[in-house]
Amino acid sequence: MSRTTDFLMSIRWIIKLHESMLKEICQEYQLTLIEATIISFLHNNPSKDTAADIVEFRMLSKGNVSQAVESLIQKSLLQRKQDTVDRRKIHLSLTQDACPITESMEAVWCKFHEKIFAGLSQEDLKLFDRVNKQIIQNTKDAMMGREQI
């Protein structure tokens, strides 16, 4: 197979593994996949705490994020707080009730990392991080160029 096909297939397999592991948490805590994704995102990215951040960084639809945020608020797992400077901006934060979920997620992410990085040395991981950052930057640059056409 071509390098492109292999690369795209590996991304897809990693995503499928990630989602299957996240689904275990969904079943345990009666969450939808998008609700679990939002909890995970807010837990792992404390400085990115708005629905717009979730939409941008997780590439999810505004409508799905809005609906899931409302559901998480109803479940007392999430709370809103209006920005003190820009009243239009709403910050989201996890409540104490979400702690057992985030603890479960931490354990799942450890297993996830162990599985996908099994057999790699510290040197391999450093190289992976460097190459991955460059690929991300190249992809962002290419997407920005396409948007300007």
Image (tube, rainbow, N blue to C red):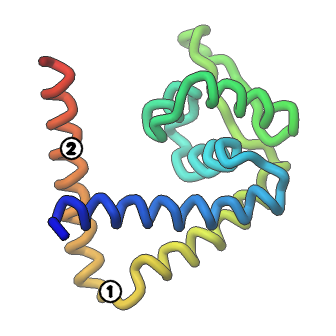
Q: Report x, y in % for residue 129.
A: 27, 66
In the picture, which quadrant includes the N terminus? bottom left
Snapshot quadrant of residue 142:
top left
Q: Single out the residue that lies furthest toward the top.
A: 87
Disc 2 to disc 1, how far (Cα)? 25 Å
Disc number lying in front (2 or 1): 2
Dot 1: within a 10 Å radius of its alpha carbon, few (fewer than 14), some, or many (20 or more) residues? few
Q: Report x, y in % for residue 12.
A: 41, 59
Residue type at the position of mark 2: Thr
Q: Is residue 149 left or right of residue 48?
A: left
In the picture, which quadrant includes the C terminus? top left
Mark positioned earlier in the residue sequence (2 or 1): 1
Near-viewer residue (6 or 128): 6
Q: Which mark is residue 120?
A: 1
Q: Is residue 53 left or right of residue 144?
A: right
Residue type at the position of mark 1: Leu
Circle 2 residue: 139
Q: What's the residue at 61%, 51% (across, down)?
A: 40
